[in-house]
Each structure stands twice: as C-alpha cells, then as structure tokens.
Amino acid sequence: MIKRKVIILGSTGSIGTTCLNAIRNGSLYGEVTGLVARSSKDSLSELAKEFNCPYFINDNSNKLKEFLSSLDGDIVLNGIAGAPGLEASLIALNCGFDLALANKESIVMGGDFILNEAKRLNRKIIPVDSEHSAIYNLIKAHNKIHSVVITASGGPFYQKKNLDNVTVEEAINHPTWKMGKKISIDSATLANKGLEVIEAGFLFNLSPKDIEVTIHRQSVIHSMIRLDNGAVYAQLSPPDMTLPIVGAVNDEVNPLYNVVKPLSFEDLTLTFKKWDEEEFPLLALAYKALEQKGSYPIAFNAANEVAVGLFIDHKIKFTSIANITKEVLMHDFSTTCNSFEEIMYQDQRARAIALKGF
Ligand SMILES: NC(=O)C1=CN([C@@H]2O[C@H](COP(=O)(O)OP(=O)(O)OC[C@H]3O[C@@H](n4cnc5c(N)ncnc54)[C@H](OP(=O)(O)O)[C@@H]3O)[C@@H](O)[C@H]2O)C=CC1
Ligand SMILES: CC(=O)[C@@H](O)[C@H](O)COP(=O)(O)O
Ligand SMILES: [Mn+2]
C-alpha cells in the first residue's frame, strides 16, 4: 500500500472534514501534508497539530502560491466553497499538483480555460462532485457514451407551493445530504443541479441535449450513462461523500475496501420524476447558459452566488434568488474568456448587475 500525500483546501468545511475523517478511520490510506482554510483559524491550527503538517489561512493568493509550492504532495483536494475556488485550483495546477475537485465553481467559471490549463501542465482533474464522480467512473468502465442522466434530490421544498416566506434554516435542511450552507440552498432551488449540468457539459464535453436531469428523491443513484446500444449504467451507493472523495484522492493507487456501507436492496425504493421548469427556473436558466457558453456560465454562477448571499442575510426572499439570476442573464455575456483575469472581469460585472437590480 502506498500512502497518498494530500493537501486539503477548505479543510474546515464539509468536504474537508469528510476527507480528514476518512484518513482518521483508515478508509483512505493517506497523510495530510498541508491544510488551508479562510477564517476558522483556531480549528485549522488544531487540525494542523493533529495531522502534524503546515497550515495556511488564505488571505492572499501570492502567499497561497508560496505555501503550496513549499509542500510535498501527490494531490490537492479543493473543497473551497464558491468562486474563490477557481483561483486556488489554478494555483494548485500551476504548482504541479493533480486536483481532486469538489469545488464545482472551478469548472463552471473556468470552463475550457481551466481544462486546457490542466492539459498544458500535464495534470489530472478528478471530479469529486458525487454525480460527476459517478459519470467519470462509469465512462472509465464503458469508454464511449451516448449521453448522461444526472440525478437530483429535489431538495427540501420539492412540490411545495408558495415558497415566498421559507427561512434560511428550512432551505438548508437537505433531505438526504449534510453539506455547507451555500450548496444546500442551491439544492433547494436546483441551482446546484444547474451548476452540475454546466460542470458536466465542460468536464465530459457534452451539449445540453445530452444531459438529462431526473428527480430521484433517495439520492442513491448518483448518476447514469446511456450507451449507443440503448443500455443504461448507474452508480449506486449511500448518500455519503466519503466514496467520491476517497476515490478521487486515491486515484486508483491502492485497492479500496469498506469505504461505504453496501446497499441492502430489500430496504430500497428508487423513484424518478420529471423536473418542472416553472417549479425550478434556475435549472432552466443554467441549461440556457450552457447552450450560450461565452461568459453566461460565469454570470449564472456569480448572480446566483450574490442572490444566495442576500437570502442568507435576510435581504431578499427565497423566490427572489431566481428572479435576480434571470435578470442578470438578460445582459450580454457572449464574450469568451481566455484568461483568469477575463473570467474575473465577467464575474465582477455579473455581481455588480445583480446587486444593482436588488
Ligand atoms: N458538501 C458536499 O457534500 C459537497 C460539496 N461540493 C462542493 O464543494 C465545495 C465545498 O462545499 P462545502 O464543503 O459544502 O462547503 P463548506 O461551506 O462546508 O466549507 C467551505 C470551506 O472552504 C473554506 N474557504 C472558503 N473560502 C475560502 C478561501 N477563499 N480560501 C480558502 N478556503 C476557503 C472554508 O474555510 P473557513 O471555515 O475558514 O471559512 C471551509 O473550510 C463547494 O464548491 C460545493 O459546491 C460538491 C459536492 C458535495
Ligand atoms: C453530494 C453532492 O454531490 C451534492 O451536489 C448533491 O448533488 C446535492 O444534492 P441535490 O442537488 O441533488 O439535492
Ligand atoms: Mn453534486
């Protein structure tokens, strides 16, 4: 067995904690060689003591680059929440590390640019997002696919009417997963599924018509692939991020045993329902953003991130998240970005429009 040396960005969050627990309980044979977070200094220094490694509070990207360059590691797990994850991903790739990527914003904002950067630097990007991890592994096993089916839990408000007065606490009460605040709210609006459709479009080079979304309340099937011959293959496991995280960080180096509890089929009911555009306008907006490409995916992410922030701060209603995002996407975002600076320019532009409209 070979010990995987892993550097964790977003060490104090849901993804970071799941990875650290997997190392603690032995489901990942790994050694932590660096830890990064943003504001939880005390927790981070405690973790650094426990894992006997250096740590860094990310308040400056040049210093993050210096910190990562000084570390020995096989792979960087990026579990940073939101748009700041993109710059961190690019820094990690440029410092010579492969990426186990949970931060979906890196792909949604970075698009072809970050994928080309990884290619240029001869580095791997291994998806950690549960749906993309499932598709990545299914493609490895079956090679050529026709299209993909991404599953969505439907969130806490599925088929509930009049969501004007729902609270932040109700919105983060996810029916099947325990995750950070922002992604939980995105699951409630299905903006998360929208981000995932865009993420799949870039990662697997698929057009919107080749990406289906189906409501699957149990979150047991993490996604499926269709082959040209009509067969469908699915990946099933309990809703637990340990498997995609351990799989990506391990990257086939060691055989994996008992990472998650095997499913018992007699206890399972698996259901599937069509999603409705009126109920989930943010998913429809994301499909359109992927179709339009240019900077529309960047604008979708930025507008939604601003709107979710306003909702968390009790400044807007839950239902206004979609309205603000829709309004921003009416502007011209047809420019294709070929650098980090161009991406951030469009990101900031979309944020300014979102804030002006509210
Ligand atoms: N949670 C999950 O199960 C899943 C998450 N994802 C994706 O993974 C990412 C992380 O999600 P999640 O773990 O839920 O989020 P959390 O909010 O639980 O954790 C976010 C982590 O990121 C750190 N962080 C935030 N900004 C920065 C920054 N600028 N530099 C360094 N660290 C930073 C936080 O540090 P601090 O505590 O110090 O503020 C914290 O450690 C998101 O992109 C999400 O969409 C994808 C699939 C599943
Ligand atoms: C665990 C994970 O990958 C999340 O992105 C998950 O997909 C959220 O669930 P829903 O967005 O399907 O509610
Ligand atoms: Mn997901």
Image (spheres, rainbow, N blue to C red):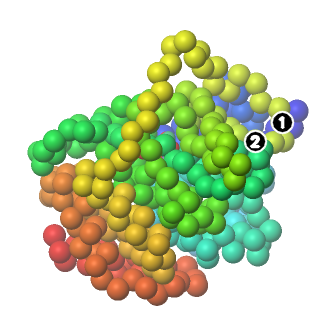
For this view, does 170 lie left or right of residue 303?
left
Q: Quickly name the residue at label 1.
A: 254
Q: Residue at x 54, y 48 (%)?
A: 149
Q: Is residue 335 above or below residue 107?
A: below
The residue closer to the viewer here, 88 or 35, is 88
Q: CA distance from mark 2 to mark 1?
A: 7 Å
Name the image quarter holding residue 348: bottom left
The residue closer to the viewer here, 306 or 239, is 239
Give the percent coordinates (x, y) of residue 342.
50, 84
Q: Is residue 265 above or below residue 147?
A: above
Q: Is mark 1 within 8 Å of ligand 1?
A: no
Give the percent coordinates (x, y) of residue 162.
13, 44
Query: Dot 1: within a 10 Å radius of its alpha carbon, few (fewer than 14), some, or many (20 or more) residues?
Result: some
Q: Quickly name the residue at label 2.
A: 250
Whether residue 55 is visible, yes or no, is: no
The residue closer to the viewer here, 248 or 225, is 225
Secondary element type, mark 1: loop
Whether residue 325 is visible, yes or no, is: yes
Give the percent coordinates (x, y) of residue 327.
24, 73
Q: Residue at x 21, y 64 (%)?
A: 323
Name the image quarter holding residue 46: top right
Q: Residue at x 53, y 83 (%)?
A: 337
> What amino acid type is highlighted by mark number 1?
Asn
Do callouts 2 and 1 mark residues in contact (Cβ within 8 Å)? yes
Give the percent coordinates (x, y) of residue 196.
49, 55
